[in-house]
Image (cartoon, grey):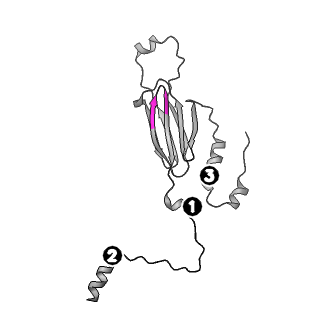
Amino acid sequence: MRSFDFTPYRRSTIGFDRLFDMLESNARATTGDNYPPFNLERLAEDRYRITLAIAGFKREEVDITAQQNLLVVSGRKADQTDAQKSAVLHLGIANRSFERRFELADFIVVEHADLADGLLTIDLRREVPDAMKPRRIAIGGTTEQPVIANDANKADDSANAA
């Protein structure tokens, strides 16, 4: 496995520490567990979908937790009785417990989750606040902001003048 040195980038960028930390920690974490398999889709510019194949799991056995910049999907199978275990001749469908973690970018929120036909789909949406959206800055000669007076202030001024 190759390790990457992000030091030159850290010197010339501001505010990307979290990104570099995430890349370095993911490079160190060599987890060979690929269960359950999943798909990541981009549905639109600000919409995404995660689909996990969790055949054999019921809704109450799956837990989805969204924290800031982290989505954790875990599944815990209920314990089987001895009668249920002895009836299975071949166990080809994996039904072990799992936990999948997805690092989310800023302003990504979970919109909806559904479990159907053994597939868990989680729809995500990027909600950028208005203050963070690009805006056009006018180039002008005056720096004064226009003052907007409301009707309540006018009524108070006329009452004080009388």
Dot 2: what SS? helix
Position of residue 139 measured from the top left corner of the image (x, y, whole percent): 60, 74
Q: Magenta region's main secondary structure?
A: strand
Instruction: Write down the region rendered in magenta.
Output: 113-120
Q: Pointer 1: residues within 10 angstroms few (<14), some, or many (20+)?
A: few
Question: If you read the primary sequence from the N terminus, does the residue marked by circle 2 or circle 3 appear first?
Answer: 3
Position of residue 68 measured from the top left corner of the image (x, y, whole percent): 49, 50
Dot 1: what SS? loop
Q: Residue at x 45, y 31 (%)?
A: 115
25 above or below 98? Answer: below
Q: Of 4 and 66, which appears nearest the observer? A: 66
Report how many numbered discs are placed on residues in the image.
Answer: 3
Residue furthest bottom in the image: 162
Which residue is the site of mark 2? Answer: 151
Q: Is residue 9 left or right of residue 54?
A: right
**CA distance separating discs 1 and 2:** 32 Å
Which residue is the site of mark 1? Answer: 134
Q: Are marks 1 and 3 in contact (CB under 8 Å)?
A: no
**CA distance separating discs 2 and 3:** 49 Å
Q: Residue at x 52, y 45 (%)?
A: 70
Q: Amino acid at mark 1?
A: Pro
Q: Are marks 1 and 2 in contact (CB under 8 Å)?
A: no
The C terminus lies in quadrant:
bottom left
Which residue is the site of mark 3? Answer: 19
Question: If you read the primary sequence from the N terminus, does the residue marked by circle 1 or circle 3 appear first?
Answer: 3
Q: Residue at x 59, y 80 (%)?
A: 141
